[in-house]
Amino acid sequence: MCLVEDPSRAALLRALELAHEKGKQIFFDPNLRLEGNTFPEEMHKAQWDAITLSDIVLVEQEELKTICKISSIKMGAEKLLSLGVDLVVVKCGKNGVEAFSHSFYEHIPAFEVKVISTAGAGDSFDAGFISASLRNASTHDALIYANAVAAVKISSESTSPMLSHRDVLSFLHSRNQEIDF
């Protein structure tokens, strides 16, 4: 959202540049919200600039196709990896998540839950993935954890459930899923 127009676009890109220069790990979700399915060139360029500064890109499958102008998730992920991204995590909704790096590919299915609302599912997934990563989880475990956070979010009647690490572990335990972190 901050990449839509200046001055927020310039400020965010500068912040990413500074973090990149200092060797900080950067997680980036394009979070495209296009009006009328138009993708202005300056916004497209800003997305590419942010992606090239990022270590991990968390992207929804249709966003990936739009940004890369490619119809294949795999080809889109390969394009981002060629730009220096270390890990591309593609959120595929009810079909789970696919993760691509230079050395591996993994698909983690979504948890089956009664869907109340999908609003905020992607942001919840991102928060879960980043939280697990900061807890030194393996990529595999971080993907499972993030899927669990998103599943709890979409199956909750609350518009913004506050989840604790313990809540997520309890959900995973109830699904016979164990993670190691």
Image (tube, rainbow, N blue to C red):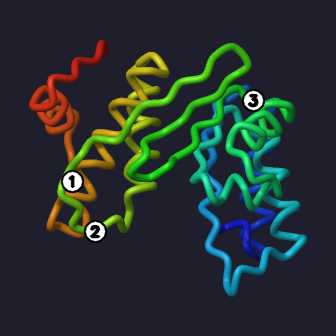
**First along the sequence among labels 1 and 3:** 3
Q: Are the two marked residues, 1 and 3, in contact with CB atoms closer than 8 angstroms?
A: no
Quadrant where the C terminus is found in the figure: top left
Residue at the image position 46 percent from the left and 36 percent from the top? 130
Left or right: 110 in relation to 106? left
Examine the image and state in which quarter residue 73 appears. top right
In the picture, the disc for residue 162 is 1
**Which mark is in front, 2 or 1?**
2
Residue type marked 2: Ser
Residue at the image position 88 percent from the left and 70 percent from the top? 42
Residue topped by disc 3 = 22
Residue at the image position 15 percent from the left and 32 percent from the top? 166
Q: Residues within 10 Å of mark 3 (few under 14, many from 20)?
A: few
Residue topped by disc 2 = 117
Q: Are the two marked residues, 3 and 2, in contact with CB atoms closer than 8 angstroms?
A: no
Residue at the image position 20 percent from the left and 40 percent from the top? 164
Left or right: 143 in relation to 48? left
**Placement of 64 over or under 9, stated as above or below:** above
Q: Give the Cα distance between marks 2 and 1.
A: 16 Å
